[in-house]
Image: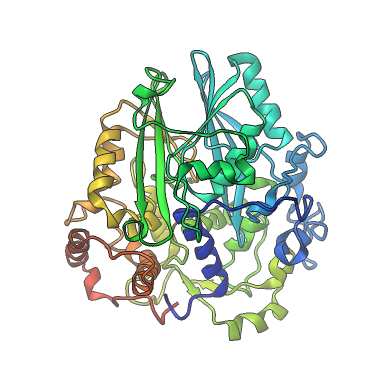
Amino acid sequence: MSGSTSLCLSLLLALSIQSATSFTPLAPTAAAFTTAPPSFLRPSLRHVARSPASGRLGGRKATGFGAGEARMDAGVKAGGDVWDRWWVLPLAPFGKRQTVMHEVVKGQVWSLEQKFGALYVHVPIRMTIVKLDDGLLVYGPIAPTQQTLDLVRGLEEEHGAVKHIVLATAAIEHKTLAGPFARKFPKAELWTVPNQYSFLFGFDNFGLLGLTQLYWFLNPKPLPPTAEEAPWAGQMSHAILGPLKSKGGEAPGLYEECVMLHKASKTLLATDVVQAVDPVIPEVLTSDVRPLVFHARDDVAALETDTEQARKEGWERIQLFALFFQPGGVDIVPWGDALPQMATSQMKDLGWNGLFPFAWRPKTGPHPPGKSHYSDSIAKLDSVRGVFCPPVLQKLIFDREPERVLAFADTVAGWDFKRVVPAHLKRDVACSPKQFREAFRFLEDGKGKYPCNLEAPPLCGDARFLEDVSESLVELGTVGAPDDGVEELRRQRRQASGADQTAPSGKGDG
Protein backbone atom coordinates (compact mmCIF):
# COMPACT_ATOMS: atom_id res chain seq x y z
CA MET A 1 0.00 0.00 0.00
CA SER A 2 1.28 3.42 -0.88
CA GLY A 3 3.32 4.98 1.88
CA SER A 4 1.77 8.36 1.16
CA THR A 5 -1.79 7.13 1.65
CA SER A 6 -3.64 9.31 4.12
CA LEU A 7 -5.20 7.88 7.24
CA CYS A 8 -8.66 9.03 6.25
CA LEU A 9 -8.54 7.23 2.91
CA SER A 10 -7.01 4.17 4.53
CA LEU A 11 -9.93 4.05 6.94
CA LEU A 12 -12.37 4.35 4.08
CA LEU A 13 -10.56 1.53 2.30
CA ALA A 14 -10.62 -0.65 5.38
CA LEU A 15 -14.34 -0.14 5.80
CA SER A 16 -15.01 -0.87 2.15
CA ILE A 17 -12.83 -3.98 1.96
CA GLN A 18 -14.44 -5.14 5.17
CA SER A 19 -17.79 -4.79 3.47
CA ALA A 20 -16.59 -6.53 0.32
CA THR A 21 -15.11 -9.47 2.19
CA SER A 22 -17.95 -9.47 4.71
CA PHE A 23 -18.43 -10.56 8.26
CA THR A 24 -21.35 -11.16 10.55
CA PRO A 25 -21.02 -8.96 13.63
CA LEU A 26 -21.99 -10.51 16.92
CA ALA A 27 -24.15 -7.63 18.08
CA PRO A 28 -24.03 -6.41 21.70
CA THR A 29 -26.83 -7.64 23.91
CA ALA A 30 -27.95 -4.10 24.66
CA ALA A 31 -27.56 -0.81 22.88
CA ALA A 32 -24.66 1.18 24.19
CA PHE A 33 -26.11 4.36 22.73
CA THR A 34 -29.52 5.63 21.67
CA THR A 35 -29.68 7.45 18.35
CA ALA A 36 -26.72 9.80 18.49
CA PRO A 37 -23.09 8.66 18.20
CA PRO A 38 -20.38 9.97 20.49
CA SER A 39 -18.83 13.22 19.33
CA PHE A 40 -15.57 11.65 18.18
CA LEU A 41 -17.54 9.59 15.65
CA ARG A 42 -19.58 12.41 14.22
CA PRO A 43 -17.54 15.44 13.26
CA SER A 44 -20.02 16.22 10.51
CA LEU A 45 -23.02 16.05 12.84
CA ARG A 46 -21.37 18.38 15.33
CA HIS A 47 -21.60 21.15 12.78
CA VAL A 48 -25.27 20.82 11.90
CA ALA A 49 -26.32 23.26 14.61
CA ARG A 50 -23.57 25.64 13.52
CA SER A 51 -24.78 25.70 9.92
CA PRO A 52 -27.76 28.07 10.00
CA ALA A 53 -30.48 27.90 7.39
CA SER A 54 -29.17 31.16 5.99
CA GLY A 55 -26.02 29.29 5.11
CA ARG A 56 -23.49 31.93 6.15
CA LEU A 57 -20.04 30.40 6.08
CA GLY A 58 -17.24 32.27 7.77
CA GLY A 59 -18.77 35.65 7.02
CA ARG A 60 -19.37 34.86 3.35
CA LYS A 61 -22.70 35.50 1.69
CA ALA A 62 -25.62 33.15 2.22
CA THR A 63 -25.22 29.88 0.35
CA GLY A 64 -28.26 27.91 1.42
CA PHE A 65 -26.63 25.25 3.61
CA GLY A 66 -29.29 23.46 5.61
CA ALA A 67 -32.18 24.49 3.37
CA GLY A 68 -32.33 21.11 1.65
CA GLU A 69 -32.44 19.38 4.99
CA ALA A 70 -35.36 21.54 6.09
CA ARG A 71 -37.31 20.75 2.92
CA MET A 72 -36.85 17.01 3.22
CA ASP A 73 -37.50 17.00 6.97
CA ALA A 74 -40.85 18.64 6.32
CA GLY A 75 -42.16 15.39 4.84
CA VAL A 76 -40.96 13.20 7.73
CA LYS A 77 -42.96 12.62 10.88
CA ALA A 78 -41.20 13.52 14.11
CA GLY A 79 -38.72 10.75 14.82
CA GLY A 80 -39.65 8.95 11.61
CA ASP A 81 -36.08 8.87 10.33
CA VAL A 82 -34.52 7.55 13.54
CA TRP A 83 -32.45 4.35 13.26
CA ASP A 84 -31.65 3.07 16.74
CA ARG A 85 -29.26 0.28 15.74
CA TRP A 86 -26.75 2.48 13.95
CA TRP A 87 -24.09 1.41 16.46
CA VAL A 88 -23.90 -2.11 14.96
CA LEU A 89 -22.10 -0.53 11.99
CA PRO A 90 -21.35 3.11 12.92
CA LEU A 91 -21.33 4.74 9.50
CA ALA A 92 -22.85 8.07 8.51
CA PRO A 93 -25.55 9.28 8.86
CA PHE A 94 -25.59 7.24 12.08
CA GLY A 95 -28.96 7.42 13.86
CA LYS A 96 -30.87 9.66 11.46
CA ARG A 97 -31.65 8.10 8.07
CA GLN A 98 -34.12 9.72 5.76
CA THR A 99 -35.67 7.58 3.04
CA VAL A 100 -36.60 8.58 -0.51
CA MET A 101 -38.84 6.35 -2.64
CA HIS A 102 -38.93 6.26 -6.44
CA GLU A 103 -41.23 4.31 -8.74
CA VAL A 104 -38.88 2.67 -11.25
CA VAL A 105 -41.56 0.84 -13.25
CA LYS A 106 -45.14 2.00 -12.74
CA GLY A 107 -47.05 -0.37 -10.52
CA GLN A 108 -44.28 -2.99 -10.56
CA VAL A 109 -40.88 -1.84 -9.25
CA TRP A 110 -39.96 0.68 -6.54
CA SER A 111 -36.67 1.75 -4.98
CA LEU A 112 -36.24 3.11 -1.45
CA GLU A 113 -32.96 4.87 -0.78
CA GLN A 114 -31.05 6.02 2.26
CA LYS A 115 -27.51 7.35 2.38
CA PHE A 116 -24.50 5.77 4.01
CA GLY A 117 -20.76 6.20 3.99
CA ALA A 118 -17.70 7.39 5.83
CA LEU A 119 -15.51 10.47 5.79
CA TYR A 120 -18.02 12.45 3.73
CA VAL A 121 -18.01 9.86 0.96
CA HIS A 122 -21.78 9.40 1.12
CA VAL A 123 -23.61 7.33 -1.50
CA PRO A 124 -27.10 5.84 -1.74
CA ILE A 125 -27.86 2.42 -0.30
CA ARG A 126 -30.90 1.11 -2.13
CA MET A 127 -33.67 -1.39 -1.43
CA THR A 128 -35.79 -2.55 -4.37
CA ILE A 129 -39.34 -3.86 -4.10
CA VAL A 130 -41.05 -5.77 -6.91
CA LYS A 131 -44.65 -6.86 -7.31
CA LEU A 132 -45.40 -10.57 -7.54
CA ASP A 133 -48.75 -12.23 -8.19
CA ASP A 134 -49.38 -12.79 -4.49
CA GLY A 135 -47.65 -9.80 -2.90
CA LEU A 136 -44.29 -8.05 -2.71
CA LEU A 137 -40.64 -9.16 -2.71
CA VAL A 138 -38.06 -6.94 -0.99
CA TYR A 139 -34.49 -7.10 -2.31
CA GLY A 140 -31.66 -5.68 -0.20
CA PRO A 141 -33.42 -4.25 2.89
CA ILE A 142 -32.41 -0.86 4.28
CA ALA A 143 -32.77 0.48 7.83
CA PRO A 144 -36.41 -0.01 8.92
CA THR A 145 -37.07 3.49 10.19
CA GLN A 146 -40.68 4.49 10.73
CA GLN A 147 -40.56 6.51 7.52
CA THR A 148 -39.36 3.45 5.59
CA LEU A 149 -42.04 1.26 7.14
CA ASP A 150 -44.75 3.81 6.32
CA LEU A 151 -43.67 3.81 2.68
CA VAL A 152 -43.66 0.01 2.51
CA ARG A 153 -47.04 -0.22 4.27
CA GLY A 154 -48.41 2.14 1.64
CA LEU A 155 -47.27 -0.25 -1.09
CA GLU A 156 -48.77 -3.17 0.80
CA GLU A 157 -52.17 -1.48 0.93
CA GLU A 158 -52.25 -1.25 -2.85
CA HIS A 159 -50.25 -4.28 -4.01
CA GLY A 160 -50.41 -6.88 -1.26
CA ALA A 161 -48.31 -7.89 1.70
CA VAL A 162 -44.55 -8.34 1.77
CA LYS A 163 -44.11 -12.07 1.16
CA HIS A 164 -40.37 -12.41 0.70
CA ILE A 165 -37.31 -10.52 1.94
CA VAL A 166 -33.99 -11.26 0.23
CA LEU A 167 -30.55 -10.54 1.67
CA ALA A 168 -28.71 -10.98 -1.60
CA THR A 169 -25.15 -10.54 -0.34
CA ALA A 170 -22.78 -11.35 2.49
CA ALA A 171 -21.59 -7.73 2.70
CA ILE A 172 -21.85 -6.20 6.14
CA GLU A 173 -23.58 -2.93 5.23
CA HIS A 174 -26.54 -4.97 3.95
CA LYS A 175 -26.36 -7.84 6.43
CA THR A 176 -26.75 -5.59 9.46
CA LEU A 177 -30.03 -4.20 8.09
CA ALA A 178 -31.81 -7.31 6.76
CA GLY A 179 -32.50 -8.92 10.13
CA PRO A 180 -34.01 -5.84 11.79
CA PHE A 181 -36.07 -5.16 8.64
CA ALA A 182 -37.39 -8.73 8.50
CA ARG A 183 -38.41 -8.52 12.15
CA LYS A 184 -40.94 -5.82 11.15
CA PHE A 185 -42.60 -8.27 8.73
CA PRO A 186 -42.96 -11.49 10.74
CA LYS A 187 -45.20 -13.19 8.16
CA ALA A 188 -42.65 -12.74 5.36
CA GLU A 189 -40.00 -15.34 4.55
CA LEU A 190 -36.39 -14.20 4.92
CA TRP A 191 -34.00 -15.54 2.28
CA THR A 192 -30.25 -15.01 2.12
CA VAL A 193 -27.25 -16.16 0.12
CA PRO A 194 -26.13 -19.45 1.67
CA ASN A 195 -22.61 -18.58 2.78
CA GLN A 196 -22.59 -15.97 5.54
CA TYR A 197 -18.99 -15.70 6.70
CA SER A 198 -18.18 -14.55 10.23
CA PHE A 199 -15.01 -12.50 10.04
CA LEU A 200 -12.27 -13.49 12.52
CA PHE A 201 -14.13 -16.50 13.89
CA GLY A 202 -14.30 -18.45 10.64
CA PHE A 203 -17.99 -19.38 10.95
CA ASP A 204 -19.08 -20.06 7.38
CA ASN A 205 -21.98 -22.31 8.35
CA PHE A 206 -25.23 -20.66 7.27
CA GLY A 207 -27.07 -21.83 10.38
CA LEU A 208 -24.84 -19.77 12.65
CA LEU A 209 -26.33 -16.58 11.19
CA GLY A 210 -29.40 -17.26 13.29
CA LEU A 211 -27.31 -17.25 16.45
CA THR A 212 -26.46 -13.56 16.12
CA GLN A 213 -28.73 -11.08 17.84
CA LEU A 214 -29.84 -9.41 14.61
CA TYR A 215 -31.30 -12.71 13.36
CA TRP A 216 -32.59 -14.43 16.52
CA PHE A 217 -35.76 -16.45 15.86
CA LEU A 218 -36.07 -15.20 12.27
CA ASN A 219 -35.23 -18.61 10.75
CA PRO A 220 -33.55 -17.30 7.59
CA LYS A 221 -33.63 -19.68 4.64
CA PRO A 222 -30.75 -20.21 2.19
CA LEU A 223 -31.54 -19.21 -1.37
CA PRO A 224 -31.76 -22.29 -3.61
CA PRO A 225 -29.29 -22.50 -6.50
CA THR A 226 -31.97 -21.59 -9.07
CA ALA A 227 -35.41 -20.01 -9.06
CA GLU A 228 -37.06 -23.27 -10.12
CA GLU A 229 -36.80 -24.36 -6.49
CA ALA A 230 -38.04 -21.02 -5.09
CA PRO A 231 -41.61 -19.87 -4.41
CA TRP A 232 -41.23 -17.13 -7.04
CA ALA A 233 -40.54 -19.63 -9.85
CA GLY A 234 -42.00 -18.42 -13.13
CA GLN A 235 -42.08 -14.79 -12.03
CA MET A 236 -38.42 -14.28 -11.25
CA SER A 237 -35.06 -15.84 -12.07
CA HIS A 238 -32.00 -15.66 -9.87
CA ALA A 239 -28.33 -16.59 -10.04
CA ILE A 240 -25.72 -16.70 -7.28
CA LEU A 241 -22.09 -15.69 -7.76
CA GLY A 242 -19.81 -17.27 -5.20
CA PRO A 243 -18.79 -17.90 -2.61
CA LEU A 244 -15.46 -16.43 -3.70
CA LYS A 245 -13.27 -16.91 -0.64
CA SER A 246 -9.85 -15.47 0.07
CA LYS A 247 -7.21 -18.04 -0.88
CA GLY A 248 -9.82 -20.70 -1.47
CA GLY A 249 -11.21 -20.45 2.04
CA GLU A 250 -7.87 -20.46 3.84
CA ALA A 251 -8.22 -16.85 4.99
CA PRO A 252 -11.12 -14.74 6.31
CA GLY A 253 -13.22 -13.07 3.69
CA LEU A 254 -15.99 -13.88 1.29
CA TYR A 255 -17.84 -12.44 -1.66
CA GLU A 256 -21.24 -13.82 -2.57
CA GLU A 257 -24.12 -12.14 -4.35
CA CYS A 258 -27.46 -13.10 -5.82
CA VAL A 259 -28.91 -11.14 -8.72
CA MET A 260 -32.61 -11.46 -9.52
CA LEU A 261 -34.65 -10.89 -12.68
CA HIS A 262 -38.19 -9.59 -12.37
CA LYS A 263 -39.58 -10.98 -15.61
CA ALA A 264 -42.73 -8.88 -15.89
CA SER A 265 -40.82 -5.58 -15.89
CA LYS A 266 -37.59 -6.95 -17.41
CA THR A 267 -35.67 -5.52 -14.45
CA LEU A 268 -32.43 -7.01 -13.13
CA LEU A 269 -31.81 -6.45 -9.41
CA ALA A 270 -28.15 -6.32 -8.32
CA THR A 271 -26.23 -5.34 -5.22
CA ASP A 272 -22.53 -4.68 -5.89
CA VAL A 273 -21.59 -6.85 -8.88
CA VAL A 274 -22.23 -4.06 -11.41
CA GLN A 275 -22.65 -0.29 -11.09
CA ALA A 276 -22.94 2.85 -13.19
CA VAL A 277 -21.96 6.41 -12.40
CA ASP A 278 -24.83 8.85 -12.07
CA PRO A 279 -24.63 12.33 -13.60
CA VAL A 280 -27.59 13.37 -11.45
CA ILE A 281 -27.11 13.88 -7.71
CA PRO A 282 -29.39 11.40 -5.91
CA GLU A 283 -32.19 13.17 -4.07
CA VAL A 284 -31.37 11.38 -0.83
CA LEU A 285 -27.99 13.14 -0.72
CA THR A 286 -29.47 16.63 -0.94
CA SER A 287 -30.73 16.66 2.65
CA ASP A 288 -27.23 17.77 3.68
CA VAL A 289 -25.18 19.33 0.90
CA ARG A 290 -22.02 19.89 2.94
CA PRO A 291 -20.33 16.68 1.73
CA LEU A 292 -20.98 17.74 -1.87
CA VAL A 293 -19.49 21.21 -1.39
CA PHE A 294 -16.69 19.79 0.79
CA HIS A 295 -15.48 17.63 -2.10
CA ALA A 296 -15.99 20.39 -4.69
CA ARG A 297 -12.96 22.24 -3.30
CA ASP A 298 -9.63 21.74 -5.03
CA ASP A 299 -7.58 22.09 -1.85
CA VAL A 300 -7.82 23.18 1.77
CA ALA A 301 -7.43 26.87 0.92
CA ALA A 302 -10.21 26.89 -1.67
CA LEU A 303 -13.43 28.79 -1.00
CA GLU A 304 -16.54 27.29 -2.53
CA THR A 305 -20.09 28.60 -2.77
CA ASP A 306 -23.04 26.21 -2.71
CA THR A 307 -24.00 26.21 -6.39
CA GLU A 308 -25.37 23.54 -8.69
CA GLN A 309 -21.96 23.31 -10.37
CA ALA A 310 -20.18 22.88 -7.04
CA ARG A 311 -22.58 20.14 -6.01
CA LYS A 312 -22.12 18.40 -9.37
CA GLU A 313 -18.32 18.45 -9.08
CA GLY A 314 -18.49 17.26 -5.49
CA TRP A 315 -20.76 14.36 -6.45
CA GLU A 316 -18.45 13.34 -9.30
CA ARG A 317 -15.47 13.24 -6.97
CA ILE A 318 -17.42 11.32 -4.32
CA GLN A 319 -18.23 8.67 -6.92
CA LEU A 320 -14.54 8.34 -7.80
CA PHE A 321 -13.63 7.97 -4.12
CA ALA A 322 -16.33 5.32 -3.72
CA LEU A 323 -15.11 3.35 -6.74
CA PHE A 324 -11.32 3.70 -6.43
CA PHE A 325 -10.75 4.83 -2.80
CA GLN A 326 -7.79 6.96 -3.95
CA PRO A 327 -8.46 8.10 -7.53
CA GLY A 328 -5.66 9.25 -9.77
CA GLY A 329 -6.94 12.82 -9.88
CA VAL A 330 -6.22 13.39 -6.19
CA ASP A 331 -2.88 14.09 -4.56
CA ILE A 332 -2.54 13.13 -0.90
CA VAL A 333 -1.26 15.87 1.40
CA PRO A 334 1.19 14.59 4.07
CA TRP A 335 -0.11 14.80 7.62
CA GLY A 336 2.73 17.13 8.52
CA ASP A 337 1.19 19.66 6.13
CA ALA A 338 -2.51 18.77 6.42
CA LEU A 339 -2.81 19.22 10.18
CA PRO A 340 -1.30 22.75 10.34
CA GLN A 341 -3.48 23.75 7.37
CA MET A 342 -6.61 23.09 9.44
CA ALA A 343 -6.01 26.33 11.33
CA THR A 344 -6.12 28.37 8.12
CA SER A 345 -9.16 26.70 6.54
CA GLN A 346 -11.91 29.21 5.78
CA MET A 347 -14.63 26.57 5.41
CA LYS A 348 -14.67 24.80 8.77
CA ASP A 349 -18.47 24.86 8.80
CA LEU A 350 -18.36 22.14 6.15
CA GLY A 351 -17.19 19.74 8.85
CA TRP A 352 -14.09 17.89 10.04
CA ASN A 353 -12.84 21.15 11.59
CA GLY A 354 -11.22 22.20 8.35
CA LEU A 355 -9.27 18.98 7.70
CA PHE A 356 -8.76 18.44 3.96
CA PRO A 357 -5.79 16.05 3.53
CA PHE A 358 -5.69 16.00 -0.25
CA ALA A 359 -5.63 18.27 -3.29
CA TRP A 360 -7.18 17.71 -6.70
CA ARG A 361 -4.86 17.90 -9.68
CA PRO A 362 -5.35 20.97 -11.91
CA LYS A 363 -7.00 20.63 -15.29
CA THR A 364 -3.93 21.86 -17.15
CA GLY A 365 -1.37 19.76 -15.28
CA PRO A 366 1.42 18.96 -15.04
CA HIS A 367 0.49 15.46 -13.86
CA PRO A 368 2.62 12.52 -12.71
CA PRO A 369 2.95 9.73 -15.30
CA GLY A 370 -0.36 7.97 -15.80
CA LYS A 371 -2.38 10.48 -13.75
CA SER A 372 -4.84 13.08 -15.06
CA HIS A 373 -7.61 15.49 -14.09
CA TYR A 374 -10.53 13.78 -12.38
CA SER A 375 -13.00 14.89 -15.08
CA ASP A 376 -11.28 12.62 -17.61
CA SER A 377 -12.06 9.61 -15.43
CA ILE A 378 -15.69 10.60 -14.89
CA ALA A 379 -16.13 11.13 -18.63
CA LYS A 380 -14.67 7.70 -19.38
CA LEU A 381 -16.92 5.94 -16.85
CA ASP A 382 -19.93 7.92 -18.04
CA SER A 383 -19.27 6.72 -21.59
CA VAL A 384 -19.98 3.12 -20.57
CA ARG A 385 -23.19 1.94 -22.18
CA GLY A 386 -24.88 -0.13 -19.52
CA VAL A 387 -22.89 -1.12 -16.45
CA PHE A 388 -19.35 -1.95 -15.35
CA CYS A 389 -17.85 -4.13 -12.62
CA PRO A 390 -16.63 -1.89 -9.79
CA PRO A 391 -12.84 -1.51 -9.81
CA VAL A 392 -12.43 -2.96 -6.30
CA LEU A 393 -14.08 -6.18 -7.50
CA GLN A 394 -12.00 -6.23 -10.67
CA LYS A 395 -8.71 -5.76 -8.84
CA LEU A 396 -9.26 -7.66 -5.58
CA ILE A 397 -11.91 -10.36 -6.03
CA PHE A 398 -13.14 -11.31 -9.50
CA ASP A 399 -9.64 -11.68 -10.96
CA ARG A 400 -8.91 -14.56 -8.55
CA GLU A 401 -11.55 -16.95 -9.93
CA PRO A 402 -12.33 -15.79 -13.48
CA GLU A 403 -13.93 -19.02 -14.70
CA ARG A 404 -16.63 -18.94 -12.04
CA VAL A 405 -17.29 -15.25 -12.57
CA LEU A 406 -17.60 -15.64 -16.34
CA ALA A 407 -19.94 -18.61 -15.95
CA PHE A 408 -22.17 -16.44 -13.78
CA ALA A 409 -22.03 -13.60 -16.33
CA ASP A 410 -23.01 -15.98 -19.12
CA THR A 411 -26.00 -17.22 -17.13
CA VAL A 412 -27.32 -13.72 -16.46
CA ALA A 413 -26.64 -12.59 -20.03
CA GLY A 414 -29.02 -15.33 -21.16
CA TRP A 415 -31.96 -13.60 -19.50
CA ASP A 416 -34.29 -10.99 -21.00
CA PHE A 417 -33.96 -7.59 -19.30
CA LYS A 418 -33.65 -3.95 -20.29
CA ARG A 419 -32.63 -2.24 -17.05
CA VAL A 420 -30.48 -2.86 -13.99
CA VAL A 421 -31.20 -1.49 -10.52
CA PRO A 422 -28.00 -1.75 -8.42
CA ALA A 423 -27.83 -1.08 -4.68
CA HIS A 424 -25.51 1.93 -5.07
CA LEU A 425 -24.81 4.92 -7.34
CA LYS A 426 -27.15 5.17 -10.36
CA ARG A 427 -30.63 3.87 -9.70
CA ASP A 428 -32.19 2.93 -13.05
CA VAL A 429 -29.58 1.89 -15.61
CA ALA A 430 -30.63 1.13 -19.17
CA CYS A 431 -28.79 -2.09 -19.90
CA SER A 432 -29.21 -5.05 -22.25
CA PRO A 433 -27.98 -8.60 -21.55
CA LYS A 434 -25.17 -8.01 -24.05
CA GLN A 435 -24.10 -4.83 -22.27
CA PHE A 436 -24.17 -6.65 -18.92
CA ARG A 437 -21.87 -9.32 -20.35
CA GLU A 438 -19.52 -6.60 -21.65
CA ALA A 439 -18.85 -5.56 -18.04
CA PHE A 440 -16.84 -8.76 -17.56
CA ARG A 441 -14.56 -8.43 -20.59
CA PHE A 442 -11.64 -7.53 -18.35
CA LEU A 443 -11.39 -11.24 -17.55
CA GLU A 444 -11.00 -12.38 -21.17
CA ASP A 445 -9.96 -9.47 -23.44
CA GLY A 446 -6.33 -8.54 -24.01
CA LYS A 447 -7.01 -5.71 -26.46
CA GLY A 448 -9.01 -3.51 -24.11
CA LYS A 449 -11.46 -2.16 -26.66
CA TYR A 450 -14.08 -1.32 -24.06
CA PRO A 451 -14.70 1.87 -22.02
CA CYS A 452 -14.00 0.64 -18.47
CA ASN A 453 -10.44 -0.50 -19.24
CA LEU A 454 -8.44 -0.08 -16.03
CA GLU A 455 -5.17 -0.70 -17.87
CA ALA A 456 -5.51 2.31 -20.19
CA PRO A 457 -5.56 6.07 -19.55
CA PRO A 458 -7.19 7.69 -17.74
CA LEU A 459 -8.51 4.89 -15.51
CA CYS A 460 -5.13 3.18 -15.17
CA GLY A 461 -4.09 6.08 -12.95
CA ASP A 462 -7.18 5.66 -10.79
CA ALA A 463 -6.62 1.92 -10.42
CA ARG A 464 -3.02 2.09 -9.20
CA PHE A 465 -3.96 2.41 -5.55
CA LEU A 466 -6.08 -0.75 -5.76
CA GLU A 467 -3.17 -2.53 -7.44
CA ASP A 468 -0.93 -1.47 -4.55
CA VAL A 469 -3.52 -2.81 -2.11
CA SER A 470 -3.72 -6.10 -3.99
CA GLU A 471 0.06 -6.51 -3.88
CA SER A 472 0.16 -5.74 -0.16
CA LEU A 473 -2.63 -8.18 0.66
CA VAL A 474 -0.92 -10.93 -1.33
CA GLU A 475 2.36 -10.25 0.47
CA LEU A 476 0.55 -10.44 3.82
CA GLY A 477 -1.04 -13.74 2.86
CA THR A 478 -4.54 -12.32 3.22
CA VAL A 479 -5.59 -13.14 -0.34
CA GLY A 480 -4.25 -15.27 -3.13
CA ALA A 481 -2.60 -13.80 -6.21
CA PRO A 482 -4.67 -12.88 -9.28
CA ASP A 483 -5.14 -15.56 -11.91
CA ASP A 484 -2.09 -15.82 -14.19
CA GLY A 485 -4.24 -15.64 -17.31
CA VAL A 486 -5.97 -12.46 -16.14
CA GLU A 487 -2.61 -10.89 -15.32
CA GLU A 488 -1.35 -11.69 -18.82
CA LEU A 489 -4.41 -10.01 -20.34
CA ARG A 490 -3.72 -6.96 -18.20
CA ARG A 491 -0.13 -6.87 -19.41
CA GLN A 492 -1.38 -6.97 -23.01
CA ARG A 493 -3.84 -4.14 -22.39
CA ARG A 494 -1.16 -1.98 -20.78
CA GLN A 495 1.12 -2.56 -23.72
CA ALA A 496 -1.65 -1.81 -26.24
CA SER A 497 -2.60 1.44 -24.50
CA GLY A 498 0.92 2.61 -23.77
CA ALA A 499 0.26 2.51 -20.04
CA ASP A 500 3.29 0.26 -19.56
CA GLN A 501 5.43 3.26 -20.53
CA THR A 502 4.31 5.11 -17.40
CA ALA A 503 5.41 4.66 -13.82
CA PRO A 504 4.39 1.14 -12.76
CA SER A 505 3.11 2.05 -9.31
CA GLY A 506 1.39 4.85 -7.44
CA LYS A 507 3.81 4.60 -4.54
CA GLY A 508 5.40 7.85 -3.53
CA ASP A 509 3.33 10.05 -5.78
CA GLY A 510 0.18 10.27 -3.64
Q: In this image, 380 relative to 20: left or right? A: left
Q: In this image, 330 relative to 478: left or right? A: right
Query: Does residue 282 appear anywhere in the picture?
Result: no
Eyeballing the image, is 118 above or below 404? Answer: below
Eyeballing the image, is 216 above or below 496? Answer: above
Q: Can you tell which quarter of the image residue 44 is in?
A: bottom right
Q: Can you tell which quarter of the image residue 126 is in?
A: top right
Q: Position of residue 364 (x, y in %)?
A: 42, 71
Q: Position of residue 213 (x, y in %)?
A: 64, 45
Q: In this image, 481 relative to 196: left or right? A: left
Q: Quadrant of the N terminus?
A: bottom left
Name the residue: 60% across, 18% down: 161
Name the residue: 76% across, 56% down: 32
Eyeballing the image, is 258 above or below 53? Answer: above
User: Which color mode does the image show?
Assistant: rainbow
Q: Position of residue 183 (x, y in %)?
A: 65, 33
Q: Position of residue 74 (x, y in %)?
A: 78, 36
Q: How many callouts does the rendering have?
A: 0
Q: Can you tell which quarter of the image residue 178 is in?
A: top right
Residue extending furthest toward the bottom = 336
